[in-house]
Image (cartoon, helix red, strand yellow):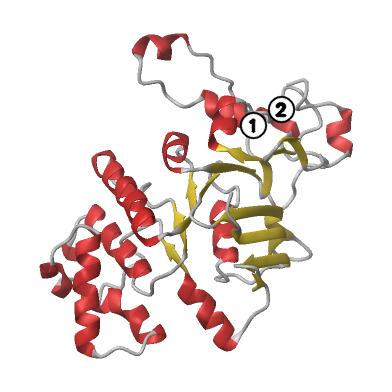
Amino acid sequence: MSENLIEVKNLCKYFPAGKKRTLKAVDNVSLTIAKGETLGLVGESGCGKTTCGRTILKLYPQTSGQIFFDGQEVSNIKGKALLNFKKRAQMIFQDPYSSLDPRMTIAEIISEGMTVHNHMTNQEKQEKVNELLGKVGLTEDYANRFAHELSGGQRQRIGIARALAVEPEFIVCDEPISALDVSIQAQIINLLIKLQKENHLTYLFISHDLSVVRHISDRVGIMYLGSMVELGSSQAIFGQPLHPYTKALISAIPEADPDAEKTRKRIPLEGEVPSPIDPPSGCKFRPRCAYATDKCAQEIPAWEEAAPGHFVACHHWRNV
């Protein structure tokens, strides 16, 4: 594997939630993303995936922990250093409508980043906008339209073009297809893969759709209630999952073969996800786990390397 572009060590992001209460949205997460790699980040809604991505991009200040970008620590950077980092690291948002300013034309939306980060003439900006529209599969005619005139898939293509406008190296894709029709989702995924190859991009791909993550990701991280519970290659996670939560998620992936769909065994998850304001003691997954013991209630599971590059946080992964 090539050198890491992103390295996160013990990242925490807490939000105040009333008197002496804290919501632990991201709790002690560590991960790396190599240059040119796609790391998929998976988990139920509210597990902290989006907050983790936004904290890595410095949209939220981290509570504690370290963030390294291309070997340089960016945890507490400010001023020009922060501006330079934001040029090199961009985001594609989940909702392609609310993330686009309805009062700005498509050309203004795409070129806004160029105005902030690059010294370009109006003619150069216009040429760049037209080039980017072509890259994402739209014609130059869209430049003078407004977001409300476009379909969901077209708006998401504009969001992708806007992220590419400042020529970043790293992009956080925050559930970029969840708000789109199923017929459009494959087009956007294939576009992201194509752009990654053409522009040598590195992705953090956040999603709750495991079949999509399996298709696009080189490695996969599984989050539960703000913490990382398993991390490994896509082949290892989907072929030999170790954590009970990962096994349950993968068992829910629909099979294309009707006969296989009838015979496959699902692992149901009972109970509700605990509150991140008042998480369970020890292992956070304990109240919903069939393998939980007294040890799980008393001790937080260690982050272990079960196989080369395959990490898990579970007291009983050898027996599961």
Q: Which amino acid does label 1 sit on?
A: Tyr
Q: In which quarter of the image is residue 22?
A: bottom right
Tell me residue 265's x, y (percent).
Answer: 53, 14
For disc 1, the neighbor class at 10 Å (few under 14, some 14 to 19, many from 20) is many
Disc marking residue 289: 2
Residue 34 pos. (x, y %) = 57, 54
Mark 2 element type: loop
Secondary structure beneath label 1: helix
The one of 238 and 19 positioned closer to us in this rendering: 238
Q: Camera-side residue: 234 or 112?
A: 234
The number of callouts visible is 2
Which comes sooner in the sequence, label 2 or label 1?
1
What separation in Å lies between label 2 and label 1 (alpha carbons)? 8 Å
Position of residue 125 measured from the top left corner of the image (x, y, whole percent): 25, 82
Pointer 2 with pointer 1, Cβ within 8 A: yes
Could you tell whether 257 is left or right of 133 in the image? Answer: right
In this rendering, position of residue 21 left or right of residue 223? right
Q: Can residue 208 be seen in this view?
A: yes
* Residue matched to label 1: 245
Q: Which residue lies furthest to the left in this view?
A: 141
- Residue at image location 67% in from the left, 40% down from the top: 309
| x 59%, y 64%: residue | 56
